Amino acid sequence: MFEAKFQTFVDDAMRGDSAARLRALRTELKRQGLDGFLVPRADVHQNEYVPKCAERLAWLTGFTGSAGFAVVLEKEAALFVDGRYVIQVRGEIDAKLFKPLDIAQTTPAAWLGGHAREGARIGYDPWVHTSAQIERFGKILAEKKIELVPLANPIDALWIDRPAEPKGAVAIHPARYAGESAGAKIKKLRAALKDTDAALMSDPHAISWAFNIRGADVAHTPIALCFALLPRDGAPALYIDGAKLSPKVRAALEKFLTLKTPEALIDDLVDAGKRGATILFDSATAPAKLVETLRAAGGKPRLADDPATLPKAIKNERELEGAREAHIRDGVALTRFLAWFSETAPKGRLTEISAAEALETFRRENGDLRDISFPTISAFGEHAAIPHYRVTETSNLKIGRGVYLVDSGAQYLDGTTDVTRTVVVGPASKQLREHFTRVLKGHIAIARAVFPKGVSGAQLDAFARRALWEAGLDFDHGTGHGVGAYLSVHEGPQRISKLGTTPLQPGMILSNEPGYYRAGEYGIRLENLVIVEKREIKGAEREMYGFETITLAPFDLNCVEPKLLSPEEIDWLNAYHARVRKILSPLVDAKTRKWLREATTSI
């Protein structure tokens, strides 16, 4: 009845070969006269979701998370992960080979500085590190005269069955979804190139947005892996594998840009360097290799934000309308799933995989699903305490009485969704109701926040944590991330976290997802997407902003302890549920409509 077409549940971790692969890498490093090597989880664009051929960290260590960094020395090695993965990493790697460390407590550079011998030579692949990353390492390692040596990635030669580079087909993103032509976007981007001859665009998300194209090179994110050179005058150049372009797409692109092979980029940077050109490089994504190529040829690299980063984050009216429409469609699918789950789960026949298959099927039945926006986090019991848990055929749990967390999303031509709901099968304990309600209070605090122009996500992050802090609790991830318009489910520069320094502006889409995780027992996360909007406040002396919540799906009232909510919080929850009921009821079947009416009753 249900099946997954956009995700698999195969346990593809490569941990069984880690010992042999680590030995082979050390042998090769010794042959090259090196004392160590840096292995980031990154591709040449610093993407979060990378093509299979760039999964070098997983190949070496067995760790499959979306963020990690390994340092390999002659006698020891360490693997650094953030708070999302501190539990997961222990189950995926051999701790005798790689020491797992929390990157918030120990950075790779600091660890390397304390463990490598004085005068050591440490190799790195300049294609998968930015200049800023290498500079940070260099400053810390200088005291011990440790040398960083750029080289061709030795893992590529050792990885015998390494997948080929992807050649996903490129499509033109229609103006009815983009809301603005590529020509208009290019004109605005050029205006930002003051005292600069050109911008080297290395972020495929920015390129896809600027040129109104979408691709199929990585899972769940519709981008084409490519580079672009945007000159202050003249046609932009797009460096892309021609196998990705149909004759129709090629003709459409050649109306406003020049198509070149990826191999031509180095030669073009050398030529620009010989002319003494000043070129802007995206400090967050540009490979150190490209920056150094220009500098070595006599050019002047300027590291700054990609000129498309902020405009891409501030959605136009058509993109915002598309996001709202996508969330109504997605809300129907998720509500149908939640109604089905509430009836089916107590019978004891569901597993984490079968639940994920059902949710994807409900989404596909709306007829507009292009892909899921990330592998569904379908987590029961102790697995729900792993923030980025990925269910496999090996880890798959049967769903019984207890907590079930489902974090999922969809890609539609008009918008990208990301939503998390936590529900209980059977009665909710007093402890669970308290923890759930404290997370809900944090979620409501963000949803109700009103703030002046210029405020960043870092200034709002504590709103989501206060109720947890008051009970001595917290969570180890950001409260919210940016979301693209039929692009990445994780988009910058906007975010609600301690690191979110970019001022929030109207049109930005972010997630609102506080959580709480009790290792070995359960996890709670409640996530909606929100749009930053202007707020008219009588008597206000400053321009004020707030959030419009666009996700539509009920929260599990069985987990709510009303006594812990203030009257204002109860009003918000009741109003939100009334809105969900009003919008979705006409769009679902009678059985789901009845469940929805009960699930959104006022408290």
Image (cartoon, rainbow, N blue to C red):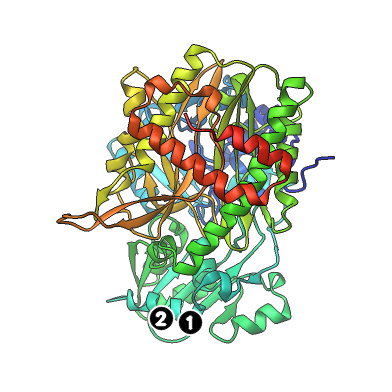
Amino acid, disc 2: Lys
Q: Secondary structure at mark 2?
A: helix
Q: Is residue 2 visible?
A: yes
| Label 1, residues with CA under 10 Å away: few <14, some 14-19, many ≥20 | some
The answer to which quarter of the image holds residue 590 is: top right
Question: Foreground: 227 or 154?
Answer: 227
What percent of the width, then of the height, locates residue 194? 28, 76
Q: Secondary structure at mark 1?
A: helix
Query: Taking 462 as reference, is 76 above or below it?
Result: above
Query: Taking 407 as reference, is 128 above or below it?
Result: below
Say which residue label 2 marks.
187
Residue drawn at x 33%, y 38% is 461
Query: Taking 258 as reference, is 377 above or below it?
Result: above
Amino acid, disc 1: Gly
The reply to whether dot 2 and dot 1 touch (C-beta < 8 Å) is yes
| Label 2, residues with CA under 10 Å away: few <14, some 14-19, many ≥20 | few
What percent of the width, then of the height, locates residue 76? 51, 25
What percent of the width, then of the height, locates residue 71? 49, 34
The answer to which quarter of the image holds residue 88 is: top right
Say which residue label 1 marks.
183
Quick check: 394 left or right of 566? right
- Cα distance between the residues tagged 2 and 1: 6 Å
